[in-house]
Image (spheres, helix red, strand yellow):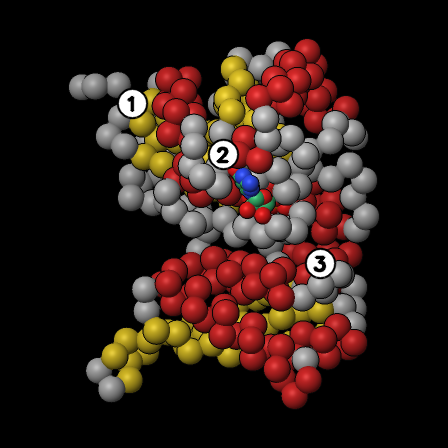
Amino acid sequence: MSKHYSGFVNIVGKPNVGKSTLLNAMLGEKMSIITHKPQTTRHRILGILSDENHQIIFSDTPGVIDQPGYKMQKAMNDAAFSIFEDADLVLFVTEPEDKYEGDEKIIDKLNETQAPKFLVINKVDISDSQTLKELEELWMERVKFDACIMVSALEKAGTDHLVNLIMEKLPEGPVYYPKDQISDKSVRFFVSEIIREKILEIYHQEIPYSSEVVVTEFKESEKNGKDFVRIRAEIFVMRSSQKNIIIGKAGSSIKQLGILARKDIEKFLEKKVHLELFVKVKEKWRDDDRLLKSFGYLQ
Ligand SMILES: Nc1nc2c(ncn2[C@@H]2O[C@H](COP(=O)(O)OP(=O)(O)OP(=O)(O)O)[C@@H](O)[C@H]2O)c(=O)[nH]1
Ligand SMILES: [Mg+2]
């Protein structure tokens, strides 16, 4: 019998450095949503990469925030820091624009963790070798990384090499998940994430950060011999003024949101989709334990 190697590889770093883009590049699948806005990822999401003798269980996590402002951000930070507890390998992601500030806590955590750790410098496509070298030196002085790898997650440059290095570091271990499983999250979760990604893209300022999406109905149906999925989702916002913005003049904005989200959901499900969106006001959802629980932020 040949040996089996497996482990939990946890991706951590500040918001917007490209953690989710990197996860998707390594998996070759769009698993995590990506936008140009910080704090896109809100939950810990597992992405599983298996071959015959290996299983890597990646965790994408929310970007680490120095000063969380409300309970949801606190829960996001807890999710980010929780990854140090069960890691077989930590990938710390940074990029040339990620200014070195407010990083003491994460540096302490990195130095405390017993697991091997890689420094991943992302976005090399928009930098030069001098800057990258300085960045590497700055980080290598502060944390005992086992390796430094330069990548462009966007262009998938260096990401296969990174996967190979990870495989070499994996301990011998069991098959944690069925080999054909690629995530721990449900289809409904990914559908709500796609809608949230479009909210981040279309709306400005505080709107995306005040919104949460819940899929309340997901039904596979058939019409005229064709399969389709009927999806109903609710968008929670904090104020009725925000509800008006989400809906837009004569419903124009929510219509655009529905079209963009439906297209991507259809791509994801490889089926026709009928999508209905509803907007609800829940004033303090970001600080409400019960709602945060029902949205999956708290246990
Ligand atoms: N030029 C360039 N841009 C990148 C690269 N990787 C990611 N980006 C961009 O950086 C932005 C943030 O990417 P994300 O993957 O959402 O970053 P994240 O670290 O997951 O962010 P949070 O979820 O908010 O913590 C997006 O606009 C990406 O397209 C890269 O290698 N090169
Ligand atoms: Mg992310």
Q: Which residue is more in the foreground, 261 or 81? A: 261
Q: In the image, what residue occupies the spot 49% across and 29% down?
A: 151
Classify mark 2: residues with Cα within 10 Å, few (<14), some (14-19) or many (20+): many
Classify mark 3: residues with Cα within 10 Å, few (<14), some (14-19) or many (20+): some
Q: In the image, what residue occupies the spot 63% across and 42% down?
A: 16
Q: Mark 3 vs mark 1: give the one in front.
A: 3
Res 27 seen here: yes
Q: In the image, what residue occupies the spot 43% across and 69% down?
A: 263
Q: Residue 79: x percent and y percent?
A: 63, 40
Res 60 seen here: no
Q: Earlier in the sequence, mark 3 or mark 1?
A: 1
Residue behind mark 3: 209
User: Alpha-carbon distance for marks 2 and 1?
Assistant: 29 Å
User: Alpha-carbon distance for marks 2 and 3?
Assistant: 27 Å
Secondary structure under badge 1?
Answer: loop
Secondary structure under badge 2?
Answer: loop
Mark 3: C-beta under 8 Å from nearest atom of ligand 1: no
Q: Mark 3 is on which residue type?
A: Tyr
Q: In the image, what residue occupies the spot 77% across and 56% down?
A: 287
Mark 1: C-beta under 8 Å from nearest atom of ligand 2: no
Q: Earlier in the sequence, mark 2 or mark 1?
A: 1
Q: Mark 2 is on which residue type?
A: Ser
